């Protein structure tokens, strides 16, 4: 499960008691996660531009922060279904249901909320004005603002959507990128010999990839050092990454969060744990937390 998220100028972390901690710019209350309803707790967080979403263990979703386009107005899931993953964009949001359908809400200027019908997805991602979904066979479907489509003939198990570019994690541990590549944010580096990528995150003009040795690679625009991931402290390893507009976050296996890059609003400030630590396996499909 996702436990950290990087938005435009704010960041989120999921605490081990199921609450959400936010830091950075809070002009619209995007850092102030509401208390979960009694008897529930958060299991995933997502950070957009000046707003946030939190997935509860009962399969419902709460939104808070800037919502002039309705991006925080989460629709009720159809009867008999529940959300298993959420993703945030600029002014729109998408949610994956347990039956493989996708719901979308908020700004729809480029058709980014016009989800395809008749398909069953296992993973979703949301960029500034486009949306992506992974099918069980490893194929990626995109909708909304389009610079280019995902390459054919690849088996993708995870996607991440940035400003005008997208990343796909292949089942062989490699990463491909497509879309706007003006700043080389799609030009994925070769992983060091003997390593492979296990997670990815696309920011505004930069990208991050987590290696199976617990280190992080960054590429694309490197203003403020947003691509310069630090070495994990001795005895630790990164287990998740999140790329924002001009900052980056990494979750360590001891529950601490390290940040690097732009910090004008405090969005990169390192956070002490304890946090809910995720597994290091590849994320293929989110699932409700079972007691």
Image (cartoon, helix red, strand yellow):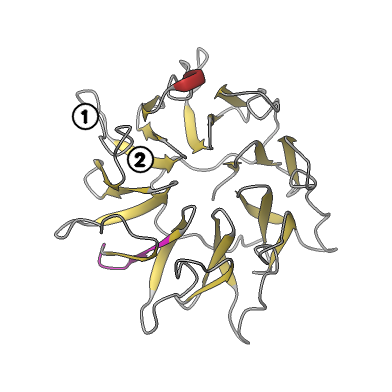
Residue situated in front as seen by the camera: 120 or 115: 115
With 123 as the anchor, is 287 left or right in this view? Answer: right
Which element is circle 2 on? strand
Residue 110 against residue 267 in the figure, above or below: below
Mark 1 vs mark 2, CA separation in Å: 13 Å
Residue 134 lies in the magenta stretch: yes
* Residue lying furthest top: 234
| Residue identified by numbered label 2 | 198
The location of residue 181, given as percent across then percent down, is: 29, 39
With 20 as the anchor, is 84 left or right in this view? Answer: left
Q: Which mark is residue 283?
A: none
Which element is circle 1 on? loop
* Rendered-image quadrant of the C terminus: bottom right
Residue 212 against residue 150 in the figure, above or below: above
| Residue identified by numbered label 1 | 190
Which region shows up in magenta?
Answer: 131-138
Q: Residue at x 68, y 47 (%)?
A: 50
Residue 11 against residue 2 in the figure, above or below: above
Residue situated in front as seen by the camera: 277 or 2: 2
Q: Main secondary structure of the magenta part?
A: strand
> Splitting the image into 4 quarters, where does residue 132 fall?
bottom left
Sequence-wise first label, 1 or 2: 1
Residue 146 lies in the magenta stretch: no
């Amino acid at each position: 499960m996702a436990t950290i998220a990087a938005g435009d100028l704010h960041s989120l972390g999921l605490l081990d008691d199921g609450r959400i901690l936010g830091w950075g710019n809070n002009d619209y209350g995007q850092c102030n996660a509401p208390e979960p309803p009694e008897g529930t707790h958060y299991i995933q967080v997502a950070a957009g531009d000046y707003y946030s979403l939190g997935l509860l263990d009962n399969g419902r979703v709460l939104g808070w922060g800037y919502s002039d386009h309705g991006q925080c107005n989460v629709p009720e899931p159809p009867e008999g279904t529940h959300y298993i993953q959420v993703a945030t964009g600029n002014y729109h949001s998408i949610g994956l249901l347990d039956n493989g359908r996708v719901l979308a809400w908020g700004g729809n200027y480029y058709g980014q909320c016009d989800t395809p019908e008749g398909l069953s997805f296992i993973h979703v991602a949301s960029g500034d004005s486009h949306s992506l979904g992974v099918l069980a066979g490893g194929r990626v479907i995109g909708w909304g603002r389009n610079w280019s489509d995902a390459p054919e003939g690849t088996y993708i198990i995870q996607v991440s959507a940035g400003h005008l570019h997208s990343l796909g994690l292949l089942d062989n541990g490699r990463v491909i990128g497509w879309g706007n590549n003006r700043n080389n944010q799609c030009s994925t580096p070769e992983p060091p010999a003997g390593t492979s990528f296990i997670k990815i995150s696309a920011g505004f003009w930069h990208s991050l990839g987590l290696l199976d040795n617990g280190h992080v690679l960054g590429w694309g625009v490197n203003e403020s050092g947003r691509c310069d991931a630090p070495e994990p402290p001795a005895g630790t390893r990164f287990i998740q990454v999140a790329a924002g507009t001009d900052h980056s976050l990494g979750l360590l296996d001891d529950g601490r969060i390290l940040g690097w890059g732009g910090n004008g609003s405090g969005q990169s400030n390192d956070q002490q744990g304890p946090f809910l630590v995720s597994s290091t396996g590849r994320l293929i499909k989110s699932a409700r937390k079972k007691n």
